[in-house]
């Protein structure tokens, strides 16, 4: 957290306190910059991994289709089923009544029908989280 000076620090230590506060804030800023760069590298690495997996999957499907081992409709149905099982947001969208807007709960981060939420000062909370307290 940035260092600030009180009137006592300014009166008692004067310029020394100013320099000390500036140096502390500079050190904290350098740390934050380093962490931001590291996070950027991690995000780029994950993006590269995702792209590589997409390419591998697409290549595998092309080989299987070329050999006649995959029927495209069956593949699409299987992918859709797995997507629904692995993605809770897709499950919420599919289970919401037609035309019902979805809202993201601020506690559990799930997408739920707007009618199943309570609006608070901090945002929308789903009924399940609200009942847990």
Image: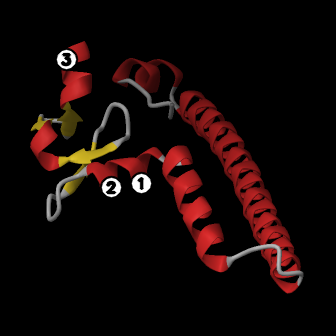
Whole-number angstrom distance, CA of label 3 to CA of label 1 = 23 Å
| Residue 94: numbered disc | 2
Whole-number angstrom distance, CA of label 2 to CA of label 1 = 6 Å
**Which residue position is annotated with label 3?**
131
| Residue 25: numbered disc | none
Counting other residues with Cα less than 10 Å from the Cα at mark 1, is it few (<14), some (14-19), or many (20 or more)? some
Q: Is residue 14 left or right of residue 117?
A: right
Where does residue 133 sit, x and y in percent of width and height? 22, 14
Q: Is residue 43 left or right of residue 118?
A: right
Where does residue 7 sit, x and y in percent of width and height? 35, 24
Whether label 2 touches label 1, CB < 8 Å: yes
Counting other residues with Cα less than 10 Å from the Cα at mark 3, is it few (<14), some (14-19), or many (20 or more)? few
Q: Is residue 77 visible?
A: yes
Label 1 secondary element: helix
| Label located before the other in sequence (3 or 1) | 1
**Which residue position is annotated with label 1?**
90
The answer to which quarter of the image holds residue 61 is bottom right
Q: Is residue 133 visible?
A: no
Identify the residue shown where x is 50% and y is 30%.
3
Whole-number angstrom distance, CA of label 2 to CA of label 3 = 23 Å
Where does residue 113 sit, x and y in percent of width and height? 19, 48
Counting other residues with Cα less than 10 Å from the Cα at mark 2, is it few (<14), some (14-19), or many (20 or more)? few
Viewer-proximal residue among 35 and 119: 119
Identify the residue shown where x is 25% and y is 14%.
132
Label 2 secondary element: helix
Identify the residue shown where x is 80% and y is 60%.
49
């Amino acid at each position: 957290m940035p260092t600030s000076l009180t009137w006592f620090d300014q009166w008692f230590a004067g310029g020394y306190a100013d320099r000390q506060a500036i140096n502390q804030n500079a050190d904290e800023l350098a740390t934050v910059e380093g962490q931001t760069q590291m996070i950027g590298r991690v995000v780029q690495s994950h993006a590269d991994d995702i792209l590589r997996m997409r390419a591998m999957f697409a290549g595998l499907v092309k080989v299987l289709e070329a050999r006649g081992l995959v029927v495209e409709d069956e593949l699409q149905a299987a992918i859709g089923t797995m997507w629904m099982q692995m993605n809770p947001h897709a499950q919420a969208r599919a289970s919401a009544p037609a035309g019902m807007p979805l809202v993201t709960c601020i506690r559990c981060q799930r997408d739920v029908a707007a009618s199943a939420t309570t609006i608070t000062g901090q945002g929308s909370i789903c009924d399940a989280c609200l009942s847990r307290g």
